[in-house]
């Protein structure tokens, strides 16, 4: 008696996927022809989501489009770079350490077409346009059998000892900047594009079986990751979620055919007419017997975990529930990319297929010309429904069949499902860098302290995707020279849409407002109450004036109207009357601005700095005419004058100090200059009288009658007065007022 035993592997499936691939697989079918002994299971979702570098890690075969982590197959030690910042004019210097890495990641043991997006620690690292958000050099190898040795690897390894990793798709990174990732190699995941569009399950099976398994046209998956030590394990891994069932081709023993498992057409199947065999030869045959397992022994819940392409390939779960008895719950990890409705249908069909196939049938039929082999559908007049042959035992004059009830689509209907929504990391281009130099009268992080050096700051930003820029001083030839630092984050900045009108620096400006357009729509401004203003919030530079704003009303399209202003902060009241249209607006923030060390430029001389961002085709320059405002004395305030009994003119004023933001003794602000000294100029507006010049070491001068008389003789109605405080580096802005005669 010849016996061929083919036993089912996997469980029921269905829907758009299961309808394409079903039939019966024999666990004991000729393992020496197609299958080897079972090995390690293939990749699961958790394995595909975490980047590894362990010896012996599997490199999956990628089909369609998948998001995978890959395996680090080569890496060098971290490269350390030291940059010294500061240190000019007796100031201590700071050594900044940065790190980069060179490494290669294996993505697929099957040739692929390309790589789309790349995520680093879950955030976009390479966008759809192929732009990298962090500085790196990148090389891609598709995994062909003739791909060359990577030049970076060859330069780091011994000559002739560098593998080409042929047959492996590789992503090679050179000098990847690790600053944004805590000076470590981040966890990278890659959008691997292995095929044009989706890939059919028939193609996947054909590839894994070495073209020995033939399936009809089948439904397709967006992507799939197959990996195991051998073909048997790879197919078995796939069958955990999609029951891959195969039967042998009776013509060629080394060929396998698959048949549809779900029955869409009730008329499908061969009808057996005639009586069942009861006696063959002298052997009495058992009568037909139908059995049904307990409902409680079948799953009541089935969950399928998969990758959702609508959610940046994040894992999703779809579950199906069956009413009635039972407590069994099954969970299947399916390393495939598929639509949410397909995943839901897969869970529903699998659950009800298991319910249907709890019914079994044992019959014996006459041996004739009709071929009986596992996978065929049969109808019996005595038994309702369709039955699929699971096992054949051929005897003398009869065939004993073991069958299970065929799963049908009677439970199926279109299922609309929802996986939920996530807010993915935006993939936006950086754009060109906008660099602005701001010469401030104080240090942003210490505005009350006296500055003994210039305070030149660099502010930079770009489009929404802009992250940082490297800064370089101007060399002797006017080209970018020495590296001076990095702007680590975009500065909130924009351009004024009008001209800011003059106002008193002694009062809150409740009359004027100014509209500003931000550098990109992602930049926002906020309101500030009185307490927040006193705490230093909303300090900004418009042109040369430093202001604070309490109100920031959004006008849409990245535009804001600033109102309730505090004007002329930090001794910049002279700039109140010097505004023009289209000035730079810079929100002063030490975290997003770089203070340039005085050693990188010459104080009170034209200065140029270059910025180079990730998307800049060339370094972007910015210039300022005479940096060093923090070293200049502040102008005096509160002038007074009176004519004495003898006709002399007494002029007084109040001294201000660069250290005057702290009134420590409540009597007089501390002197920030080397000596106290003032210069006074008296003149006629029409120039008809020779000007009067005086210097004083105290905030008071006496102008004699002889010096005043020429103004009376020429009928001058008002004397124009200008008072400067003298500092080590020059004069302050003038205190200007008129003295009526």
Image (tube, grey):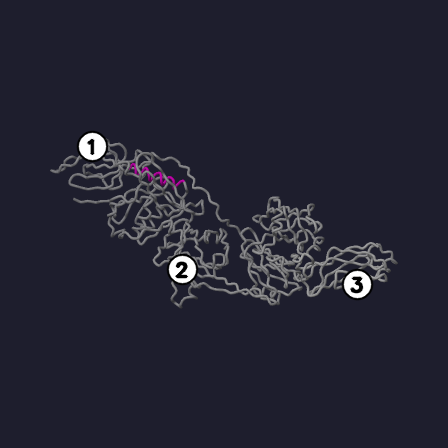
> Circle 3: is it few (<14), some (14-19), or many (20+) Cα within 10 Å?
few
Distance from disc 2 to disc 3, alpha carbons, whole Å, reads 83 Å
Q: What kind of secondary structure does the magenta stretch mostly adopt?
A: helix
Q: State which tag comes first along the sequence, 3 or 1.
A: 1
> Circle 2: is it few (<14), some (14-19), or many (20+) Cα within 10 Å?
some
Q: Position of residue 554 (x, y in %)?
A: 61, 44
Distance from disc 1 to disc 2, alpha carbons, whole Å, reads 64 Å
The N terminus - image quarter: top left
Indicate the secondary structure of the residue bearing disc 3. strand
Left or right, residue 324 beside residue 138: left
Residue 344 among magenta residues: yes
The magenta-colored residue range is 341-356
- Mark carried by residue 147: 2
Which quarter of the figure has residue 663? bottom right
Indicate the secondary structure of the residue bearing disc 2. loop
> Circle 1: is it few (<14), some (14-19), or many (20+) Cα within 10 Å?
few
- Mark carried by residue 693: 3
Using the image as rendered, state which of residue 110 and residue 678 is in the foreground: 678
Q: Dot 1 corresponds to which residue?
A: 274
Q: Position of residue 470 (x, y in %)?
A: 55, 60
Q: Nearer the viewer, mark 2 or mark 3?
A: 3
Q: Position of residue 84 (x, y in %)?
A: 54, 65
């Amino acid at each position: 008696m010849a016996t061929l035993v083919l036993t089912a592997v996997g469980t029921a499936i269905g829907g758009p996927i299961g309808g394409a691939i079903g039939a019966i697989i024999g666990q004991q079918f000729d393992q020496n022809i197609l299958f080897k002994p079972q090995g390690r299971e293939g990749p699961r979702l958790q394995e595909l989501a975490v980047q590894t570098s362990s010896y012996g890690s599997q490199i999956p075969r990628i089909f369609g489009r998948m998001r995978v982590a890959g395996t680090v197959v080569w890496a060098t030690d971290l490269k350390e770079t030291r940059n010294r910042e500061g240190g000019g004019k007796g100031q201590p210097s700071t050594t900044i350490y940065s790190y980069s890495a060179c490494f290669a990641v294996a993505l697929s043991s099957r040739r692929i077409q390309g790589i789309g997006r790349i995520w680093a620690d879950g955030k976009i690292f390479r966008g759809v346009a192929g732009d990298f958000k962090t500085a790196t050099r990148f090389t891609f190898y598709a995994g062909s059998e003739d791909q060359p040795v990577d030049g970076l690897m060859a330069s780091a390894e011994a000559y002739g000892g560098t593998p080409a990793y042929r047959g492996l798709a590789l992503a090679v990174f050179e000098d990847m900047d690790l600053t944004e990732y805590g000076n470590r190699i981040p966890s990278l995941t890659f959008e691997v594009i292995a095929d044009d569009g989706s890939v059919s399950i028939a193609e996947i099976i054909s590839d894994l079986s070495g073209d020995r398994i033939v399936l009809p046209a089948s439904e397709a998956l967006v992507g799939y990751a197959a990996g195991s030590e051998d073909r048997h394990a790879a197919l078995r891994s796939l069958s955990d979620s999609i029951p891959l069932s195969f039967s042998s081709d009776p013509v060629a023993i080394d060929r396998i055919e698959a048949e549809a498992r779900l029955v869409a057409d009730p008329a499908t199947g061969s009808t057996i007419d005639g009586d069942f065999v009861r006696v063959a030869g002298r052997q009495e045959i058992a009568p037909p017997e139908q059995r049904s397992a307990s409902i409680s022994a079948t799953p009541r819940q089935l969950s399928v975990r998969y990758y959702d392409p609508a959610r940046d390939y994040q894992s999703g779960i779809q579950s199906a529930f069956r009413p009635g008895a039972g407590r069994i719950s099954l969970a299947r990890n399916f390393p495939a990319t598929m639509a949410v409705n397909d995943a839901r249908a897969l869970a529903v069909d699998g659950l009800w297929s298991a319910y249907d196939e709890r019914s079994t049938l044992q019959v014996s039929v006459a041996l004739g010309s009709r071929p009986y082999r596992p996978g065929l559908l049969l109808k019996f007049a005595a038994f309702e429904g369709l039955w699929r042959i699971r096992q054949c035992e051929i005897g003398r004059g009869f065939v004993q069949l073991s069958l299970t009830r065929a799963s049908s689509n009677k439970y199926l209907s279109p299922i609309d499902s929802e996986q939920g929504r996530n807010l993915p990391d935006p993939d936006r281009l950086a754009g060109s860098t906008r660099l602005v130099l701001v010469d401030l009268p104080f240090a942003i992080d210490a505005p009350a302290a006296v500055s003994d050096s210039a305070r030149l700051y660099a502010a930079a930003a770009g489009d929404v995707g802009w992250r940082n820029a490297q800064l370089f001083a101007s060399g002797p030839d006017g080209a970018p020279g020495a590296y001076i630092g990095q702007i680590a984050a975009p500065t909130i900045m924009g351009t004024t849409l009008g001209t800011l009108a003059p106002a008193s620096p002694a009062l809150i400006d409740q009359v004027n407002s100014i509209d500003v357009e931000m550098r990109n729509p992602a930049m926002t401004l906020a309101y500030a109450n009185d307490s927040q203003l006193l705490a230093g919030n909303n300090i900004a530079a418009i042109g040369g004036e430093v202001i604070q704003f309490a109100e920031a009303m959004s006008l849409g399209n990245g535009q804001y109207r600033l109102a309730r202003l505090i004007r002329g902060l930090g001794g910049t009241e002279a700039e109140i009357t010097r505004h023009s249209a289209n000035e730079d607006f810079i929100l002063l923030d030490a975290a997003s601005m770089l203070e340039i060390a005085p050693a990188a430029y010459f104080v009170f001389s034209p200065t140029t700095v270059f910025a180079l961002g990730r998307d800049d085709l060339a370094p972007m320059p910015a210039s300022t005419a005479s940096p060093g405002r923090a070293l200049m004395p502040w102008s005096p305030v509160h002038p007074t004058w009176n004519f004495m009994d003898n006709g002399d003119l007494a002029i007084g004023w109040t001294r201000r100090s660069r250290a005057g933001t702290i009134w420590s003794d409540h009597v007089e602000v501390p002197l920030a200059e080397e000596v106290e000294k003032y210069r006074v100029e008296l003149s006629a507006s029409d120039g008809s009288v020779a000007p009067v010049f005086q210097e004083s070491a105290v905030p008071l001068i006496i102008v004699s009658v002889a010096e005043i008389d020429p103004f009376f003789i020429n009928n001058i109605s008002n004397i124009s007065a200008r008072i400067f405080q003298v500092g080590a580096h020059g004069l302050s802005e003038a205190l200007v007022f008129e003295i009526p005669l």
